[in-house]
Amino acid sequence: MKKQERARVEELVGPCRVTRGKGFRLRHFDPADTGPFARDAGDEASDKSRAKRMLADSVKWLAEQQDVLYAQDRWSVLLVVQAMDAAGKDGTIKHVMSGVNPQGVEVTSFKQPSAEELDHDWMWRSWRALPPRGHIGIFNRSYYEEVLVVKVHPELLAHQKLPADLAGKKVWERRYRDIRAFERYLADNGTVVLKFFLNVSKDEQKRRFLARLDEPEKNWKFSAGDVRERRHWDAYQQAYEDAIRETAAEHAPWYVVPADNKWYTRLVVASAVVDAIARLKLHYPRVDAAAREALAAARAELEGESDRSGKSKGV
C-alpha cells in the first residue's frame, strides 16, 4: 500500500481504534461522526458518492489480498462484529466482503446457545468456528455476548449450569480475563483479531425500527424482542464500555465505528481490515530450487506431449 493510501486509511480508522482500555468512555465517540467527510464540508450526496468509490477500491484490494492470504497459508483473520440491534451488522459484512472468494471466508452468526452448547464451556462454540490458516472468519455477534447480553440479563447464567461458587459477582472479571487470554493465544498463533462495535445512537435505532414497521419488505427484520431489549439501552451501553475497556489491546484492537450513517460505517470497517492485512506484508509462496526443477520438468513433459500430438496428426 502506498504512503498516501496508508495516510487516507489511517485518517478514517485512527479515531475509531482502541488499543488501551484505560480511560475509555463510550460517550467520547459520536455515532453520527463522518470523520474527514464532515471536515471537508461537502454535501451529503457527494460524500456518499466519494465514499462509495473508496469502498469499491477497498473491496477490490481485499479481494486481491485474500487470494494471497489463502495461497500463503500462514495467517488467518478473525473479524468480530458487535452492535445493538439495527446498527447494520449484516449490511456491513455484506458490503465489505462483497468481492472476496466465498471459499476463503466463513461467517458465523451466534444466536441463543443450543442445548448442546450449554453442555460445554461458554467459549466452546467459538473455538469450533475459528478460521483456519489462509481464511477470513467473521463472527456476527460472538463470545462477547457472554459479557454483554448475559451481563444485562444475569438470570441467563442459570441456564449455563455453572457450579454455584463460580456464578457469583466475580464471573465477569473471570470472563474478561479469559477473553484476554483467548485473544492473546490467537494472536500468538497467527490469527489477526479485529473487533468492531458499530456504535448506533438510540434515536437512529428508533428510526430504523420504525422503518422496519412501515415498509412491508422490511417487516421480517423486526422482532418484538427488539423493543424489549431497547428498554435496557443504558445497561447495554455500560456493558459495551466495560467490555471494550477490559479487552482492548494492541494485538486485538477494538474499533468503535460510527453507525448512524451506513455508508460511512462500511467504509471505516473496510479500511480497518485493509490496514490490518496490509501490515502482514503478504506474498505468494516462493518457489525453491527443487520446486523450480520440478516445474521445469512438468513444462517439458507437457510441451513434449504437445509436440508428439502434432506429429501424430501430420502422419
Image (cartoon, rainbow, N blue to C red):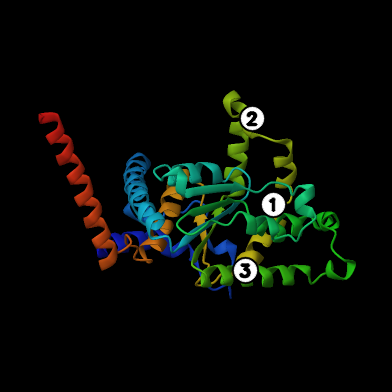
User: Which quadrant of the structure image shows residue 9?
Assistant: bottom left
Disc 2 residue crowd, few under 14, some 14–19, many 20+, Cα 10 Å: few
Which mark sits nearer the N-terminus, 1 or 2? 2
Q: Position of residue 295 (x, y in %)?
A: 25, 56
Q: Which residue is mark 1?
A: 233
- Give the label on residue 272, or none: none
Which mark sits nearer the N-terminus, 2 or 3? 3
Q: Which residue is mark 2?
A: 220
Q: Which residue is mark 3?
A: 182
Q: Are marks 1 and 3 in contact (CB under 8 Å)?
A: no
Rendered residue at 53%/56% (across/down)? 131
Q: Position of residue 187 (x, y in %)?
A: 52, 69
Rendered residue at 35%/43% (across/down)? 52
User: Which quadrant of the structure image shows residue 35?
Assistant: bottom left
Q: Is residue 247 above or below residue 129?
A: below
- C-alpha distance separating marks 1 and 2: 23 Å
Q: Position of residue 183 (x, y in %)?
A: 58, 68
